[in-house]
Amino acid sequence: MEKITRRRFLRNSAGGVLGAYAGTLALGTRRSLSAVSANEKIVFGLVGCGGRGTSLMRTFLERPEVEFAYLCDVNSRRGGGLVRGLKSRQSRTPKRVSDLRRVLEDKDVDAVIVATPDHWHGLATILACQAEKDIYVEKPPSHNVWEGRKMVEAARRYKRVVQCGTQNRSEAYVHKALDYIKSGKLGHIPLCKVFNLKSGGPHHLRPDSKQPDELDWDTWLGPTPNRPYNDGIQHGGWHSHWVFSGGDMADDGIHQLDIARWLLGKDYPKGVYSGGGNLAFDDDREVPDTQVVTYDFDGVVITFELSQWAPYMSKTPGSIRGSDAFPYWPQNATRVEFYGTKEQMVLGRHGGGWQVFTGGGKVIAQQYGRPGDAPHRDNFLECIRTRKLPNADIEEGHRSAILVHLGNISSRLGGRKLTFVGETETFVGDEEANSLLKRTYRKPFVIPDVV
């Protein structure tokens, strides 16, 4: 099995990683820029064979028109069992590869699922757009603001369907919450509170060690700075370091922030301020374990509260997500609260449902919920055929990811109050803050200015 190493990237193209794909991109795809007919198979490649990638693959395989031609992961031990399992579920035997380009150069592949760690989402999505594939990219779509805009530009230039993994946008009960808010029954909504108050423990780096033979560590690092292999980073610890991630606000909180921004009909905040830091643990994490962000929009303030240490807070359990029941709201870790001048709405993500309250805890309206993975998948498949924009189009995913990035930039600058201009996606009069809108990309894993 051939590994895609930095030396090989450079040998293939003096222009860097995007240049290395030039020959592939010129080939086009079997159904380039056209809809897939109703009686044709939709052929997928899975990029990232970890837990979330595997879960998404299984969800897509519930649809009979879906086949997987490739399982791609830089760890050669991942995906082998999936290949064996797929042999009995579809007509073709998928290829297990470590090189993303092998997936993208195949003209029979219609779409890819990008389920890598966060720091690879932007680059993989742009490359897939250039190869004229449609993309389902997990949240958060981007590592930084500049990268997210490049993803949007690539999707539009190559006319690709790019669905972000913010599946609440395909959940029927959230659409009904939107209808209720639009009806005006809550009144004017000057305040919205978004919660991501979860349990957790300290993050301690392990000593650097020899990389496993089965892992292409250089490609796993991708656009991030080169560093020795560390088992604690590679196995989930990357969530706690800025070069890889935006912390739990990026990993989980983006779902609730996306709901809030969508239901309130807002695009960009005018100002942002983040308080908090590493207050609960004396550990090695760079991202906050305690964070409160305030976003100033026209007509409404949105606050976001995060913890990584509260054992009494919990996500909505599966028993509630799949039934006609509601969470115990005060200890629901991932809720959104809309404070109207007439009524209050409390909404849970991923099937938590919603309830509307007046004084004394009286419930005057409610809707049970169901998770959105299946309808979000169906929406993506439909848009592959029709070429319509999906429910969680990359432009919407990018704007919600901006809330994550802005809050984290304020946090990294010691809680600085920042003024933001949506039209240019830049800060006013703060070059230090503007320097954090984009990362330094390690060659050859570079996203160019023109995608």
Image (cartoon, rainbow, N blue to C red):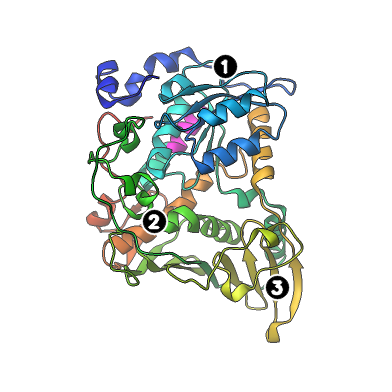
What's the mark number on residue 247?
A: 2
User: Which residue corresponds to the image point at 62% horizontal and 52% vertical from the top-left?
Assistant: 168
> In the image shown, does 95 or 430 lie closer to the viewer?
95
Q: Is mark 3 on a helix, strand or loop?
A: strand
Q: Classify 166 as above or below 39.
A: below
**The disc labelled 1 sits on which kind of residue?**
Asp
| Pointer 1 or 3: first along the chain | 1
User: Which residue corresponds to the image point at 30% horizontal and 25% vertical from the top-left?
Assistant: 5
Image check: 81 left or right of 451?
right
- Res 407 → quadrant: bottom left
Is residue 154 on the magenta stretch?
yes
- Res 255 → quadrant: bottom right
Residue 39, x across and y down, in percent: 75, 21
> In the image shown, does 58 or 289 lie closer to the viewer?
58
Region rendered in magenta: 151-160
Question: How many C-alpha atoms fall within 10 Å of the one at disc 3: few (<14), some, or many (≥20)?
Answer: many
Image check: 31 left or right of 444?
right
The residue that disc 1 covers is 108
**The disc labelled 3 sits on which kind of residue?**
Val
Q: Can residue 183 be spotted in the picture?
A: yes
**The disc labelled 2 sits on which kind of residue?**
Gly
Q: Report the magenta stretch's main SS.
A: helix
The residue that disc 3 covers is 356
